Image (cartoon, rainbow, N blue to C red):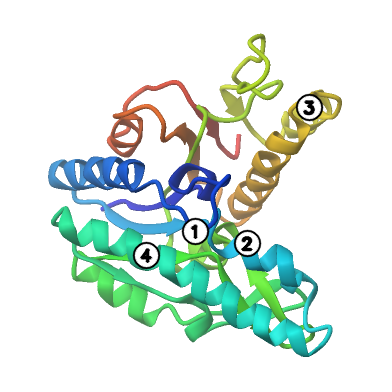
């Protein structure tokens, strides 16, 4: 039975131009595709999601990623966590409405960071839920930090910590586009999809994007790819794909292992 991690990107499931605005139609579409795929297969699934226009609003305002720098930082910690958790409740609610037994799993409730990196998080509850056929839903969260007071744990960092402990087989990252491109595909019609990334060609991919107009957009993608390749150093059998959440059916096809337009990432 495969264990698969799926991440809903914050830019995909929220409207980043409007504070605290979830794109519930997109979330529901993605959840329905997961429900359909689960009926056809026996996959064990952990879902995570970014914060988009929820958590990032306060994170930017209070600069909480820099740690505790004054009394206002703790206020920022509380507000950022609350905003991220509010989006998590929306996501879990839609899962339940679509007949998927999903359970919110708050990383900060059992975990700690150290110097901005995840140091610990309880996995016993996650394992129990997976064994029972439920879908744990984690999210990018504010964490207490043993050196900085507080720091942020992105969903990618949560996945990086959980991957070897839950022995993940595949990871699927759902974004606005089909994956990593040679330029920003939302602005450059000549941008070409990079279909396969490995440790051998990653530096070439990075250099090729260095002068592109879309570096700000794809820079986030490349950071994801670095973290994915980091997981694969420990677990070379793990495979990953970056797929579009804007195109109905893509996530379902990826879960079922079908051939689709996307960026695939493997250890070799």
Residue position marked by numbered label 4 in the rendering: 137
Report the mark closest to the observer, 1 or 3.
1
Q: Earlier in the sequence, mark 4 or mark 2?
A: 2
At horizontal 49% and vertical 26% (from top left) the residue drawn is 262
Q: Which mark is residue 57?
A: 2
Precedes in sequence: disc 3 or disc 4: 4
Query: What kind of element bears circle 2?
Result: helix
Residue 143: x and y in percent read 61, 79
Q: Please state if 137 lies on the left or on the right of 101 as rendered.
A: right
Q: Residues within 10 Å of mark 1 (few under 14, many from 20)?
A: many
Q: Nearer the viewer, mark 1 or mark 4?
A: 1
Residue 172 seen anywhere in this rendered image of the structure: no
Determine contact: label 3, label 4, CB under 8 Å.
Answer: no
Q: Position of residue 154 (x, y in %)?
A: 60, 62
Please indicate, yes or no, whether residue 126 appears anywhere in the rendered image. yes
Residue found 66% across the figure and 15% down from its top: 191
Q: Secondary structure at mark 3?
A: helix
Q: CA distance from mark 4 to mark 2?
A: 21 Å
**38 shown above or below 257:** below
Image-quadrant location for residue 118: bottom right
At numbered mark 1, what does the secondary structure look like: helix, strand or loop?
A: loop
Q: Earlier in the sequence, mark 2 or mark 3?
A: 2
- In this figure, which residue is indicated by the disc labeled 1? 20
84 relative to 258, above or below: below
To which residue does mark 3 refer?
209
Give how far apart the Cα atoms at labels 1 and 4 are: 19 Å
Q: Residue at x 59, y 19 (%)?
A: 193
């Amino acid at each position: 039975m495969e264990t698969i991690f799926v991440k809903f990107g914050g830019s995909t499931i929220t409207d980043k131009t409007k504070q605290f605005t979830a794109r519930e139609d997109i979330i529901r579409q993605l959840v329905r595709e997961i429900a359909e795929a689960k009926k056809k297969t026996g996959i064990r699934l952990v879902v995570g999601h970014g914060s988009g226009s929820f958590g990032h609003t306060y994170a930017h305002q209070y600069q909480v990623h820099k740690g505790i720098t004054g009394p206002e930082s703790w206020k920022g910690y509380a507000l950022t966590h609350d905003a991220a958790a509010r989006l998590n409740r929306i996501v879990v609610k839609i899962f339940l409405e679509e007949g998927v037994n999903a359970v919110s799993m708050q990383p900060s409730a059992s975990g700690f960071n150290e110097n901005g990196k995840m140091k610990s998080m309880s996995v016993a509850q996650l394992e129990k839920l997976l064994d029972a056929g439920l879908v744990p839903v984690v999210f990018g969260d504010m964490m207490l930090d043993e050196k900085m007071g507080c720091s942020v744990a992105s969903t990618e960092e949560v996945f990086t910590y959980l991957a070897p402990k839950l022995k993940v087989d595949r990871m699927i990252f759902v974004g606005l586009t089909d994956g990593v491109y040679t330029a920003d595909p939302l602005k450059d019609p000549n941008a070409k999809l990079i279909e396969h990334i490995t440790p051998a060609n990653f530096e070439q991919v990075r250099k090729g994007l260095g002068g592109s107009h879309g570096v700000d957009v794809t820079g986030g993608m490349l950071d994801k790819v670095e973290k994915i390749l980091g997981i694969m150093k420990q677990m070379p059998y793990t495979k990953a794909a970056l797929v579009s959440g804007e195109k109905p059916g893509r996530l379902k096809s990826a879960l079922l292992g079908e051939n689709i337009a996307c960026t695939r990432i493997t250890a070799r």
